[in-house]
Image (cartoon, coloured by chain):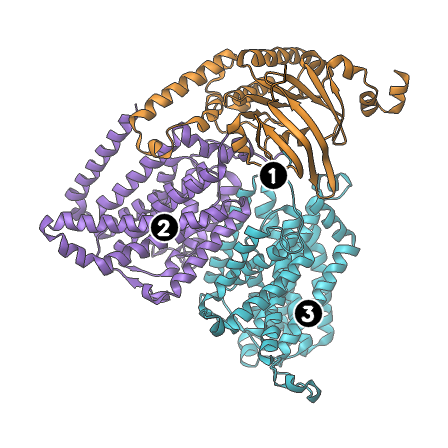
Chain colours: A cyan, B purple, C orange
Amino acid sequence: MIEFVQQLINGLSLGAVYALIALGYTMVYGVLRFINFAHGDVFMIGAFAGLYLAPYVMWLWHFSPLLTVVYMLLLLVIAYALLRHPWIALLLAVGLYRGLVALAPPIAKLQDNFPAPSWLGMFVVLATAMVVCAILGVLIEKLAYRPLRNRPRLTVLITAIGVSLFLENFGQYAFGVDPQSFPDLIGDQAINLPAWCGPFTDLTIMESQVLVFAVTIFLLIALRFIVTKTRLGTAMRALSANPVATSLMGVNNDTIISFTFGLGSALAGAAGILISIQQPSVDPLMGLQPGIKAFVAAVLGGIGNIPGAALGGLLLGIIETLVVGYSDELHISPGYRDAIAFLLLILILLFKPTGLLGRVEREKV
Amino acid sequence: MFERHKITLLASLAIIYFISARFSSSISPYIYQIILYIGINITLAVGLNLVNGYTGQFSLGHAGFMSVGAYAAATFTNNAGDATLALLKPLGPMVSTSIVFGAALLIGGLAAGATGLLVGIPSLRLKGDYLAIVTLGFGEIIKVVIENVDALGGARGLTVSHPYTNLFWVYATAAVTIYVVLNLVNSTYGRGFLMVRDDEIAAEAMGINTTKYKVLAFTLAAFFAGMAGGLYAHLTQFIYPDGFNFQKSVDIVTMVILGGMGNTWGVVFSASLLTILPEGLRALADWPSLPKWMGGLLGNRMIPYSLMLIVLMLTRPQGLFGGMTLKRKKA
Amino acid sequence: MSEPPPLLDLRNVTVRFGGLKAVSDFNFAIRHRELVGLIGPNGAGKTTVFNVITGVYRPSSGAILFEGKSVGGKKPYLITKRGIARTFQNIRLFCSMSVFDNVRSAFNMQLRHGVSHALWRGGGLAAEEARIERDVGELLDIFRLGKFRDAMCNSLSYGDQRRLEIVRALATRPKLILLDEPAAGMNPTEKTELMELIRFVQEKYEIAVLLVEHDMRVVMGICQRIAVLDYGIKIAEGPADEIKHNESVIRAYLGVEASASS
């Protein structure tokens, strides 16, 4: 029983990461009816953004909390500029990076003497990665997908594959092929469960697992708020239902689509940091497996359906962890871990392609 | 009229045999290898073109079928090859090795074809993006399965003892593949593939069992991929699951797209081009006067490759030779 | 004297989409060589009736009999093989193929030489292909499309494309052909030509025709019998004259006051 609960907990924190990535897939599909193949690689870029920027950001937090607040405000400005002037946002971001590097001690000194772990510092790193990925997502959409808006879906799919391969291989070129270790940002340790938990005190719950789960819940709530209560979010839902009518209502579809990509990519960036906190090994191909699994999760929940993606992600994380955890009893080799998601995908698409929460779309004859 | 095609095929086979016998030894081994790879890629791409190009079904798991063929053929020659050779000794070395290798290739093709049938029947009910993802999924599942089967060498790979592949076998297979695909498509029956691609609903209204056509194209393509896999295995003499990964499937798909989906000779050309290109890029990357960063970029051929894919889709999605401009979506 | 059984018989056919009944309890029969019209305001369910006859939708309840045998819920290609052909509201031609190939596509289902012969090109294949070539050429000539033989279908005028779609459907040698708004987008001259075409087809090939149309001149001009749908329910059926003056029909199209004043 304890074993089962332990696996459940592990599965939930894995599933939370899948859920965050899945949200990006499902939002883009809802709005454009297109599977963004490159989404998993945006997740990878988020992790690497964290890897390269964490030393500076953590140093900044320790050096001056006030300046960090200024930094966060600047991030906000960049995010705001991203919607209408992505290139200016990129310029601002590069400027901010340059400023940060100029202010901070040289990287070698930082890496020898890595700033002490800090939860709040980690949040700043998280925000940074989210902004980096948002910029990346918006630019990819603008350069590679938007020109193909009216072409057959196949063409865009191939382009997305091209973008994905480019990110992976350029990443290998720029970051090196070998895995690198992600710094410990929060001083991860197991939580001491109080005595009243009874037999459950034997469970190993890491701080990072709680963190991941909490941040995911928070982001989900924030997303729900954005999607239901803000104008941008409502426009997104309208676009998903009927693009032509939406533009006739005076909405700039392009802006909303940029927004969708930016939002989804930001969530993927967050996922990149969160997984690196749990499994501190990053490499340029780390987006492949989580990417496809998150896609499966989105399909499982019903592609295009936001709560569905979250549900699908959590479910997939749990199923995968349970199957691997009980692999002996099930007489399956744990090497089949990655095949589980694919098997699940094939089964869903064959038997319930609309997923758990999705709706059927009929073609008009 | 149709007799002419059979004669052309037989004549081609004779010419290939002659070239292979006469010139194989005079070509440098490096160039010879590239020529063989070209032929193998032609078989792969022309087969896939039947599915992606002519029938309009987007398959992203073709490397999986290649791997099934490679492992099946290799297992046969590794385990039963010597015994069969001994049995056929009286027929002379050339005939006996031909029979053994031919059988191995056929076994590879049939195994891959059977896999294609198994994968195709459930998958081909899906359309567009979903079909692509499912085929990708099946490709990955095949890879994972092989990795977990020790008898096939698992993730460490499998050594192939007999280096049977030569110019004749490679190009004979390619010639047969081209012959079969062209013959099939240029018949009333074969026009059915195009109908499925253009408008499935209208095709059904014309009495076409669209699922049957899709599965047929898929299975046939898998069969040829299996033969290509067998040829590949007996060329490299060492196969491992990661050599048949998603990247390889993308390689083949790129050849089909670049050549122009639905244009067999265009695909032959692009398969040849894209086989030579990485070698060219590699040579360029080693050029002494090139700045180091550029050398690194070119050294990983996937970087210019992926950029090429993107640029191709943005500027000329119908490929080099695709006549039909892909329809714009209706408003 | 007993009536011969109808060619197509719809009995209490209902088609439901979720909670919506697109077609309710539809009873309708077409006899051999009849030219029947199906009319009704927009959204009445006419195309749904087409789709359920041709297998695109399954009937939620009821039976559809063709030549006495059930076809309800069967796959479209099987229904075409039984002898029901159709055209589409938005023309669905095979646009990457020539006009010739579009008509040739109809002969696929009659092929005696399938895959293997296409692969290895046996002797019988050549003869069959030659015969098909002749038949297609004939059809094209009869319907004055011969000069467009090798053209791509999107280079044809709208009226010619419609004609091509009808010829293609005809090439499947059906006993019943369903025409879905064939006059849509045509000018009066083209519509008159269309009416002649339909009459010609019906007489020469001795087939039954079911026509969905909005243009009343076309419908009243050629149909022997007309059924009227409104919100998925048949509200009237009979010869053209009766339907023209039927109160419920007028009400369905024009509203209550129009029927009061007629």
Query: With B81 as the anchor, is B221 left or right in this view?
Result: right
Q: CA distance from mark 2 to mark 3?
A: 46 Å
Q: Amino acid under label 3? A: Val
Query: With B211 as the anchor, is A140 left or right in this view?
Result: right
Observer-nearest of A345 and B233: A345
- Chain containing mark 2: B
List the residue tagged with mark 2: B112
List the residue tagged with mark 3: A215
In the rendered image, the vertical position of residue B313 relative to residue C246, given as above or below: below
Q: Where residue A23 sits: x, y (%)? A: 64, 58
Q: Amino acid under label 1? A: Asn
Q: CA distance from mark 3 to mark 1?
A: 37 Å
Quadrant of residue B148 in the image? bottom left
Query: With A22 as the anchor, is B122 left or right in this view?
Result: left
Task: Of the two numbered discs 3 and 1 on the same chain, state the one appearing first in sequence.
Answer: 1
Q: Where residue A216 sits: x, y (%)? A: 67, 67
Q: CA distance from mark 2 to mark 1?
A: 37 Å
Callout 3 and callout 1 share a chain: yes
How busy is the neighbourhood of tag 2: few (under 14 within 10 Å), some, or many (20 plus)?
many
Instruction: Name the mark nearer the viewer: 2 or 3.
Output: 2
Q: Amino acid under label 2? A: Ala
